Structures are given as structure tokens and as C-alpha cells.
Image: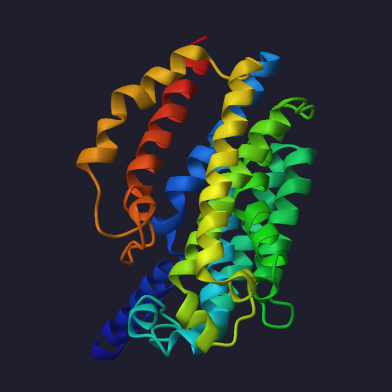
Amino acid sequence: MNSKVLQQRTLHSRAAGILKLSRWKEHILFTVPVTLLGVNMAADQHAVTLDWHILTVVAANILAVTCAFMINDIEDAPDDAGDPARAARNPVTMNEISRREGWVATHVIALLSLALYAWVSTGAFVIGALTIVLSYLYSWRAVRLKARPLVDVLSHVLMLAGLLFLAGYYAYDDQPGNVWLVALGVALVSVYGQLYNQVRDYDMDRAAGLHNTASILGPVWMRYTMYGSIGLAVLCLLITIFLGLWPLWLILVPVIMSPLLFFYRPQNDMRGTEAIDLSGRIQLGFMFIANAAVLIWLIANLLD
């Protein structure tokens, strides 16, 4: 009887470790709105009828990003051991699960994600397959795109932004046209996120010998580039509004919710670590507004 209880506890702790490895709380707030943005764009531009594939493509993207985060922590486990905060959130570093268990779970999630992409459409499957491939190559030490200057930013932008948006769009249409400018704007926001992360982790990454973009530009120029990418993203937004790619009534959502950015400014960024600047403190508030906007837009499209 005691051995059965011990076995159940072991299985429970392993499941908890795998769930912790997924880091779902860190990425679901941007994976869902980016995917639904693509879906809404397809619905608005081509008057397509939305169906249950909304749920399928959202689930596929969530699993693909989960795969990317899991591989990152599995491969970074030795490096994370040198920093108490990063070690505490990595279940492989803390021996809560083994590398083998982490890899098995990752492969299962990757296959499930690919199956869901294939269920959605051919275009979504191709985009999803590229997302999965990048999720492996980005952190896998045999290649480790994250340790290659410029390539690290480009692969991150595709894997965690541009391709997610396009998967949502290609679930319903395969002719983006001017919508490519929206994809570019989404990618530029992701550039900010990647550069922000590299500035925050600059000292730790240098200690680990990671030769990424930050190691070339340095933290000062990284900040300039980080804020410049946000400026270019805003420019893309203005151009796409002028082109009529957005319903004008949608601006009411951020206008009404904008006080959230002033009253809700935690000291931590989206990853839960101490924010390095004001932009880090408003990340969560911005994502709440983005989620509200795309969900309201989705409801409007479903009711239309």
C-alpha cells in the first residue's frame, strides 16, 4: 500500500515538473492573441466563415510554443544552475524531472501540435512544421540559433510571433496581400521582446558564454534598438489603419482600457522577473488589452 502511494506521488511530481517545464503562464498571454489576430484578419479581409478550426489552430500554436519553451529549459539547465532565480524555475535544473523525461514530453507535444496543424489546413501545417523545426534548432546545443548574433533575433521573431500569426491567418485564407504589413508589425513587437530579454539576461548570458546579438551590440545599443523596434511597429500599425485593415470601432477597446497601464504596473515583467524599465512593467497590462481587443473582435466576427 505504501509503495503504491509513493509511486502515485512520484508520478504526480513528474507531471507537475513537466507542467512547470511548459512555462505556459509565460507564453499563453501572447500566443492566443497573436493567433486570433491572424484569424480575425482573414475573416475581415476575405469574409470567410469562422468555424471550430479557431480552437484547433490556437491549440496547435500553444503546443508549438510550449515545445519551444520546454526545449529551451532542457538545454539551458546547466547554465541556469549558476543563477538561483533561473534555477528555481527550471525543473530539470532542480532535478524535479530528468532530461530524458523532458525530451519525451517535448516530442509528444510536438507531434500532437503537428497533427492539429494538419487538421486545420495545408498552409497551417507547413507554417506549423517550420515553427516546430525552429523551436528545436533555436535551443538545441548542436545548432543553438539563440547563440548566433542576428540569427537569434530572426528565429525568435518567426517562431514566437510571425509564424503564429500566419498559422491563424492560413487557417482560413492563403492570400495575405497587405496583411503582410500586419505580420511585420507583430514581428517588430516580438523583436522588442527578444531584445528586452537579452538586455535583462545580459550578465548571465555572458557568464554562460552565449554569443548572441547582445554580445555584439552591448546593452546600451540594445536598448536603442529595442525601443526603435516598437516605434517601427507603431508605424506599421498606422499604415495598416490607413489601408483599412482594421475595423475603426476596435480603437475603443484600448482607449477604454488604457488606464490599466497607469494603475496596474507591477514591478515584474511578463516572465515574472524584476522589470528593467517602464516597458517591462507595462508588459502584462499591454497583453491584457491585446487579449481583450482580439477576443471582442472575434466575437464580432462570429456574430456577423
- At x 42% / y 90%, what residue is drawn? 82
**Residue 101, can we see it?**
no
- Which one is in front, 59 or 157? 157
Is 12 left or right of 132, judged from the image as shown? left
Is 155 left or right of 123, judged from the image as shown? left
Quadrant of the rendered image containing residue 121: top right
Q: Is residue 48 above or below residue 163?
A: above
Tell me where residue 191 appears, x and y as whole percent.
59, 53
Tell me where residue 226 appears, x and y as whole percent.
53, 54
From the image, which quarter does the N terminus lie in?
A: bottom left
Tell me where residue 65 appears, x and y as whole percent.
56, 57
- At x 52% / y 16%, what residue is drawn? 301
Q: Is residue 191 above or below residue 108?
A: above
- Which one is in front, 24 or 100? 24
Looking at this rendering, what residue extends furthest in the top direction?
304
Q: How many marks?
A: 0
- At x 29% / y 60%, what residue is drawn? 268
Looking at this rendering, what residue extends furthest in the left direction?
263
Quadrant of the rendered image containing residue 264: top left
**Residue 165, can we see it?**
yes
Q: In the rendered view, how is the structure colored?
A: rainbow
Q: Is residue 134 above or below residue 188?
A: below
